[in-house]
Amino acid sequence: MKYFYRSQALPGNAVTEALPPHPPQNGQKIRWAFSCDRNPQENCFRAEPGNQMQGILSLVFLLDMTMQRPTSSDRIEGIILAAGLSTRMGMPKLTLEIEGIPIIKRVVRAALESELHRVILVIGPSDSGTVDALGSVATDPRLLQVVNPYPQAGMSSSMRTGMESLDRKAAGVMILLGDQPGITGNVINELLAAFRSEQTKIIVPCVLGRRTTPVIFPATLFPELMEEAGDIGGRNVLKRHADQVVEFEMSQEYDDADLDTPEDLDKIRSSR
């Protein structure tokens, strides 16, 4: 069995073109990426021509994410990005409380109250306080907690970490931010309904014409999401597939404010 590679090693993320032993019917090469479980400052994998062993390891996730597989329209999963470093807040922000409820608990509870098939919570390696803040919500059978060992690699590294745990039959994924306490189960369900009616589209919520989050991506774009790097989430995928974007105007009751600074927190607390 022979593999051919062209690779570029990046900090925390190796981007590879590969021709698998059983290529898709169109015979085209597949671009893909995978997260690194080592120090993001190192080149975690370098797939060179003739290096068959590393190629086999690299192809495992490639084949799982890119080969055609059955999807189920009711399996739309959510990934909550909660491994950020809270640098602008100056303290762990997700455990801060609004009306006596930790911010992260509000977000996770809303996701679990929705019709999402499962909720994947991505936390950092030292985020035991985040888990404690969930209380009894942490034991919900639909909640899966996964750890991004190197959150300093940016938001995209957390997104990739969460995607590695997606149900193989998931028709789409909703990317939620852990610092949006105004999200509700109803808001999520509105977006899910929009996606179910157009499952090849990217559903982007809007508030008074302004794009916001959470965004739902179809399964066909999972491999591209796995290529994202840095602190931009899925923004590049949105740009490349502008023709697939459906902007969904939300009702004005959706408060999409996120929390980055102490001033943001004061503003939200004073508005309630």
Image (cartoon, grey):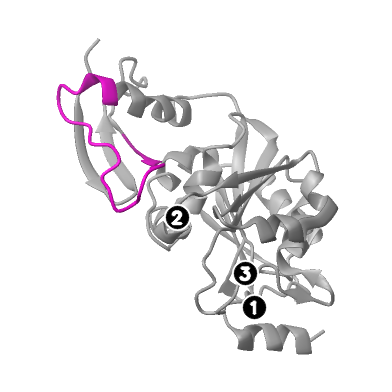
Which residue is rendered at x = 81% and y = 51% of the image? 137
Please say if the residues under marks 3 and 2 sit with CB atoms less than 8 Å apart.
Answer: no
The spot of residue 31 in percent (x, y) is 31, 37
Please say if the residues under marks 3 and 1 sit with CB atoms less than 8 Å apart.
Answer: yes
Please say if the residues under marks 2 and 1 sit with CB atoms less than 8 Å apart.
Answer: no
At label 1, counting other C-alpha atoms closer than 10 Å, the crowd grade (few under 14, some 14-19, many 20 or more) is: few
Residue 229 belongs to the span the image colors magenta: no
Which residue is rendered at x = 25% and y = 10% of the image? 1
Amino acid type at circle 1 is: Leu
* Residue topped by disc 2: 156
Figure quadrant of residue 268: bottom right
The Cα atoms of the two marked residues, 3 and 1, are separated by 6 Å
The spot of residue 154 in percent (x, y) is 43, 60
The Cα atoms of the two marked residues, 3 and 2, are separated by 22 Å
What is the magenta segment's predominant secondary structure? loop
Figure quadrant of residue 7: top left
State the extent of the magenta-drawn residues as a range.
31-54
* Residue topped by disc 1: 208
**Quarter the C terminus occupies:** bottom right
Amino acid type at circle 3 is: Cys
Q: Is residue 113 depicted above or below 58 in this figure?
A: below
